[in-house]
Image (cartoon, helix red, strand yellow):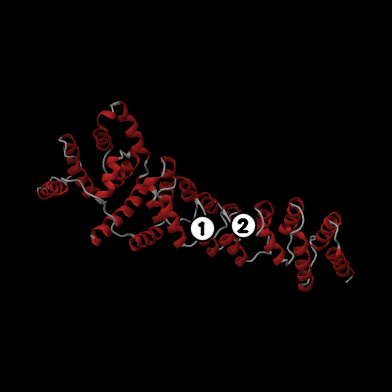
Amino acid sequence: MAGENSSFALLLDLAKETSSEKRRELLRQVTDVFLADGQTRTEKEAIVFDEIVGAVASDLEDQVRVELARKVAASAAPIGRTARRLAMQEIEVARPVIERSRALSEGDILDVIRQKGQDHMMAVTKRTDIGESVSSALVERGEDNVVASLLQNNSARIDRATYERVADRAMTSPVLHAPFVKNQQVPLDLLNNVYLQVESGLRREIMRKFHGVSPAELEAALEASRNRLSAAYGAVPGDYQAAVQQVSDLERKGALKPPVLVQLLREGHRTAFTVAFSRLVGVDFDLTQRLVDGQDVDALAMLCRGAGFDRALFVTLCLLIGGHEYGMAKAEAFGKLYEQVPVAAAQRALRFWKVRAKSQSAAA
């Protein structure tokens, strides 16, 4: 009771004081007493503290409010209104409260996201109690650096729909590539979707994740991929139909086998090569065309390895696709690249792209 009376006496003195200097000192005394570690505060005390401290704190200079915010952030006292007021102030004051205060409710945090700017949202990403609603709101309103910080928070809970939105953004945002790939909870099919957009080191990270996945997890991911994919064909080359006919003729003759790919490239039938490669590997034409046009040898190595092409064939294809840009000096490097791709991981990744090809074919 004596402690409670002491707290109330300080609060009353603070409410009545008009001198700025004395207010600052009284505020420090009040917060030191009221927010002391291990002290249990009643709802009545918290209400009085919230009302009085909140009323005087807004009139004090930044340094004092920053000091108050740090104390509030570290306290377990039920002072939600004070915490909320501080969280809505300029970022220097708000940051410690937003990042650490247990007095802020999820509703308070959502209001911060809706009403404040990117700096405040960045502070939200540092919390240890981020739920799915908060994650969704951060992805909806936050810029890429905010979303990247959210992905790097291992305690944040993020639902499937939010991961899908991040995956879509990652297709055009390099800032999101590493945080997205390294996040341990990203669904496998969404990792596969960004494979072609990320650099080689991150591709190896994705392959490692495929390598360690169980058959049950793989099937679940494949099903998710089937449910999400839709047709998204771009323009095809002018000789596409003739190329399809040429490859179909080869298939009827039983000649559509991996070695024929080299023949098609050497004869200058690039579109027919792309159609034939797509059929032999089991992926869609659009994907193969992008890889060949972009000379994406990393992804081609994964497809060839997963389809069981031999090393020499892969090296020859790479040299022919590159034309004058690639000399024989590149052959050894291509061979090493091919050998570094884990067969099992490549086969798992290839299954995703086969699902994509079947989904697009059915939709078309």
Q: Position of residue 136 (x, y in %)?
A: 50, 61
> Which residue ends up furthest to the front in the rendered image?
18
Q: What element carries label 1?
A: helix
Residue of label 2:
127
Q: Quadrant of the N terminus?
A: bottom right
Residue 159 visible from this viewpoint: yes
Disc 2 crowd, CA 10 A, few/some/many (<14, 14-19, 20+) = some
Residue of label 1:
141
Please determine whether, in this image, residue 350 is positioned above or below residue 199.
Answer: below
Q: Position of residue 216 (x, y in %)?
A: 39, 61
Q: Where is residue 124 in the image (x, y as percent from the top left)?
A: 60, 56
Q: Which of marks 2 and 1 is nearer the N terminus?
A: 2
Q: Which quarter of the figure has residue 310?
A: top left
Q: In which quarter of the image is the C terminus?
A: bottom left
Of residues 71 and 360, which is closer to you in this image? 71
Tell me what residue is drawn at x 28 percent, y 59 percent. 359
Residue 130 visible from this viewpoint: no
Of residues 111 and 303, which is closer to you in this image? 111
C-beta proximity under 8 Å, tags 2 and 1: no
Lateral position of residue 221 relative to residue 243, left or right:
right
Q: Is mark 2 on a helix, strand or loop?
A: loop
Lateral position of residue 36 relative to residue 181, left or right:
right
> Which residue ends up furthest to the right in the rendered image?
2
What's under tag 1, amino acid-wise?
Arg
Lateral position of residue 338 relative to residue 54, left or right:
left
Tell me what residue is drawn at x 75 percent, y 67 percent. 50
What's under tag 2, amino acid-wise?
Arg
Please determine whether, in this image, residue 6 is positioned above or below residue 288.
Answer: below
Labels 2, 1: front one:
1
Lateral position of residue 329 relative to residue 132, left or right:
left
Residue 67 is tagged as: none
What is the total number of numbered labels drawn onto the structure image?
Answer: 2
